[in-house]
Amino acid sequence: VQLQASGGGLVQAGGSLRLACAASGRTFTMGWFRQAPGKERRFVAGIRWNGITSYVDSVKGRFTTSRDHAKNTVYLQMNSLKPEDTAVYYCAAARGSPNPTYSRNYDYWGQGTLVTVSS
């Protein structure tokens, strides 16, 4: 399975962006991670096949992940963006239905898309 992430860019604080991740095949659990400069890659959001979602506390109420099974695509709607959201965002896919918060549970990774939030 190949993943293609898109939608990153430069936005002012308080603005919005929507990331998309298109998969070349069927996937089950999908996740979003981000890596800020000089920091480790961290979990942001995840969505299981049945639509159950999970989020890191710092984005709850601001970010929403959703999926379109017909298009094999998952989305990350990011609202009220803050400068600390600046990072390269990666999408990931797992064949099964593991805990979505751990990067080790994913089988496939996209190439990353840069999100820059200016203050």
Image: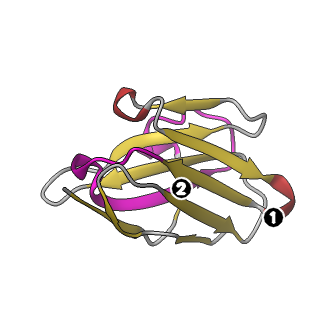
The quadrant the N terminus occupies is bottom right
Q: Foreground: 116 or 54? A: 116
Q: How is the image coloured?
A: secondary structure
Kind of residue at badge 1? Lys
Q: Is residue 21 left or right of residue 109?
A: right
Q: Is residue 5 left or right of residue 23?
A: left
The residue singled out by tag 1 in the image is 71
Query: Could you tell me the amino acid type at mark 2?
Result: Ala
Element at label 1: helix
**Could you tell which of marks 1 and 2 lies nearer the N-terminus?**
1
The span picked out in magenta is 79-105
Task: Give coordinates of residue 18: x percent, y percent.
Answer: 54, 59
Which residue does the image show at 60% across and 34% down from the upper left?
Answer: 98
User: Residue sitting at 71 percent across and 61 percent down?
Assistant: 73
Q: Is residue 30 left or right of residue 13?
A: right
Circle 2 residues within 10 Å: few <14, some 14–19, many ≥20: many
Q: Position of residue 102 (x, y in %)?
A: 43, 37
Q: Which mark is residue 92?
A: 2
Q: Residue 44 at x, y = what percent?
A: 42, 42
